[in-house]
């Protein structure tokens, strides 16, 4: 991939990312208070852990792309101070800004540099923005399916929902 191509891919991917993040925060914020420990099955993550996984993985992906390597650091357990949905969203807002600044500062050549993803695939770093986005949307879909059984309301995502009609 040429640097100018990497810059174009970056611009397109970050436009999509910018659209998905507010929707993701809306779904996370719809977790009803007192229902953070809900899980539909014993093998499933709780609602709060799933929300944490969504936001921490997004930041981990963004920083890993900027680092030019994927490692285990930064993808660990939820910090003890994260206890509520509000804490998750506040953490996300705090750390997303720095991760985005790091990516935005990268040149086309840096974005085009091949990065190894745990020996499974090596590709230009910028292409992992697509994997990140698919991961985010996948888990957001899981979390949205938790909401009604928890007694919550499902917000509009790509269109209206029974709880939030399209305006």
Image: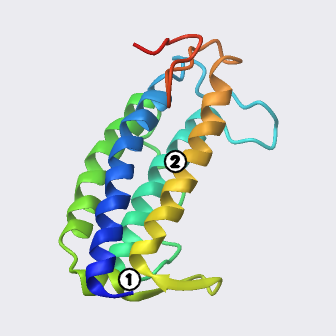
- Quadrant hosting residue 163: top right
Is residue 55 toward the left or the right of residue 41 in the image? left
Q: Is residue 135 left or right of residue 11?
A: right
Question: Percent from the top left, x then y, of residue 112?
Answer: 35, 84
Q: In the rendered image, which residue does mark 1 sit on?
A: 68
Residue situated in front as seen by the camera: 137 or 118: 137
Distance Cα–Cα, label 2 vs label 1? 21 Å
Residue furthest out toward the right? 42
Q: Could you say where residue 53 lies in the image, as x and y percent from the top left?
A: 54, 49
Frontmost residue, 22 versus 16: 16
Work out whether mark 2 precedes mark 1 in sequence or the reverse, and give the earlier one. Answer: 2
Q: Residue 54 carries which label?
A: 2
Q: Where is residue 124 in the image (x, y as percent from the top left)?
A: 43, 83
Establish if 88 lies above or below 147.
below
Location of the C terminus by quadrant is top left
Mark 1: give few (<14), some (14-19) or many (20+) Cα within 10 Å.
some
């Amino acid at each position: 991939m040429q640097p100018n191509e990497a810059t174009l891919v970056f611009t397109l991917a970050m436009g999509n990312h910018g659209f998905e993040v507010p929707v993701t925060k809306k779904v996370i914020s719809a977790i009803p208070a007192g229902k953070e420990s809900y899980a539909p099955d014993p093998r499933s993550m709780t609602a709060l852990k799933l929300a944490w996984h969504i936001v921490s993985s997004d930041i981990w992906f963004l920083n890993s792309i900027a680092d030019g390597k994927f490692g285990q650091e930064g993808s660990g357990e939820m910090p003890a101070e994260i206890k509520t949905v509000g804490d998750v969203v506040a953490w996300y807002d705090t750390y997303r800004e720095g991760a985005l600044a790091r990516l935005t500062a990268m040149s086309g050549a840096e974005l085009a540099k091949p990065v190894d993803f745990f020996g499974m695939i090596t590709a230009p770093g910028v292409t992992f923005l697509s994997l990140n986005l698919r991961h985010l949307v996948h888990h957001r879909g899981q979390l949205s399916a938790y909401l009604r059984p928890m007694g919550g309301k499902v917000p509009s995502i790509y269109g209206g929902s029974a709880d939030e009609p399209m305006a």
